[in-house]
Image: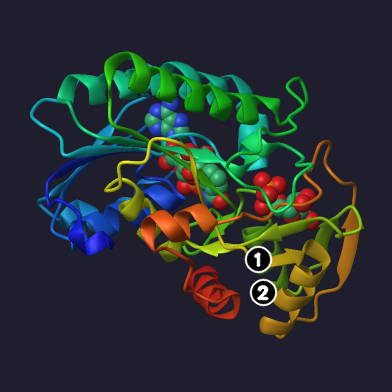
Amino acid sequence: MTSTELVKGRYLVTGGAGFVGSHLCERLLNLGCEVIVVDNFITGRKTNVQALLRNSKFSLIEKDIVEPLEISGGLAGIFHMASPASPVDYMKYPIETLRVGAHGSDHILNLARQKKCPVLVASTSEVYGDPLEHPQRETYWGNVHTIGPRGCYDESKRYLEAITMAYHRVYGVPTRIIRIFNTYGPRMRTDDGRVVPNFCMQALANEDITVYGEGKQTRSFCYVSDLVEGILRVIQCDHVEPINLGNPNETSIFDFAQKIIGMAKSHSKIVYRALPQDDPKTRCPDITKAKKLLGWSPEVQLDEGLRLTFDYFKNI
Ligand code: NAD
Ligand code: UDP
């Protein structure tokens, strides 16, 4: 199964003006699909989809999906990507984050029920919290601090998964759940606070690279085109339970900082800042399930993905 086999119909993308959503829209249009985006621009930007607005198969609705939503006509599928995603963003907007995961998801799942179409929802590796299992398999239930500063996001996404399964069990909606692990690439906001834009912008400006804690915590970074390919395979399969999508190539944040300095040929020095509360110590996806079910695994190496990302940050 590949993305090219996707039914060439009319798709709704919530959060389509965000980083991942805009790449997904671009790919859908390139495949010949029609795309409707609903976004309230809380963390996304119209510029992310500016070029797509010239395409007659693309339309953009500025709307908060926490409010009820009506879309006329049929839909071939829904991709529910709307939610603040960067820790800096969701800690700035904790109520909005919880509401979009709860009320927003309810509205979108109800729309899928009305339209009798599949709906894919974007969950996250954050449902595993500060994981006690490594790498994380879909069977792991997680270790989440519900009332900590990240709880607004983690619990929003855990609720998203729960209500998605409820719509499937009660109404038979064809639902899909993906758990996305750290993804990067062009169109991330330079100020979204995530490690990739922070380190890239700091290295390009020869400013200090801010490593939080001692930099021993690990992450594994997936290039956005690999994620989009995975998303388009998941919506076509009939597997209802969560599927991890991410790159299992794990690195410590300290090593990552050194890599960025080297690639940018930067004079930046590493400085250490306080580790944010509840920052997960390790994170790495077990992608055995995605490999088996979808024949999917990431193809873009970190060096190649970072080069493309640097090019983007240099040019904006
Ligand atoms: P992003 O912030 O760039 O995009 C999210 C988009 O959703 C933005 O355009 C924002 O304006 C929109 N949005 C938020 N609340 C909304 C609302 N109430 N109504 C309408 N639109 C709303 O983030 P992203 O990195 O592109 O993440 C996209 C999705 O993938 C999110 O659901 C996120 O939780 C999930 N995810 C992303 C990553 C990652 O590494 N990028 C990792 C795990 C999960
Ligand atoms: N991080 C860092 N310096 C920064 C930004 C982030 O050391 O300037 C660390 C952060 O503490 C975390 C990792 O990089 O351990 C990834 O952070 P990010 O905000 O990208 O996403 P997270 O994986 O925490 O959701």
How did the renderer colour the structure?
A: rainbow
User: Badge 1 is on which residue?
Assistant: 201
Left or right of residue 311, residue 166 in this image: left
Q: Quadrant of residue 296?
A: bottom left
The residue nearer to you, when weighing 313 against 167, is 167
Q: Alpha-carbon neighbours of circle 1 within 10 Å: few (<14), some, or many (≥20)?
A: some
Q: Position of residue 141 (x, y in %)?
A: 66, 32
The circle drawn on residue 204 is: 2
Name the residue nearer the viewer: 243 or 196.
Answer: 243
Report the amino acid beneath label 2: Leu
From the viewer's perspective, is residue 116 above or below residue 124?
A: above
Q: Position of residue 171 (x, y in %)?
A: 28, 16
The residue carrying mark 1 has its beta carbon less than 8 Å from ligand 2: no
Quarter of the figure that contains the N terminus: bottom left
User: Which kind of residue does numbered mark 1 sit on?
Assistant: Met
* Residue 227 at least partly seen: no
Check the image and report above or below for 287 versus 280.
below
Q: Position of residue 225 (x, y in %)?
A: 41, 64
Picture quadrant of residue 13: top left
Depth order, front residue of 145/276:
145
> Is there a contact, CB below 8 Å, between mark 1 and mark 2?
yes
Q: Who's the residue at 61% across and 55% down the image?
A: 286
Query: Is residue 57 shown left or right of residue 149?
Result: left
Q: Residue at x 14, y 55 (%)?
A: 55
Residue 103 visible in the shown view: yes
Horizontal and vertical percent position of residue 314: 54, 74
Residue with the most extreme front position: 292
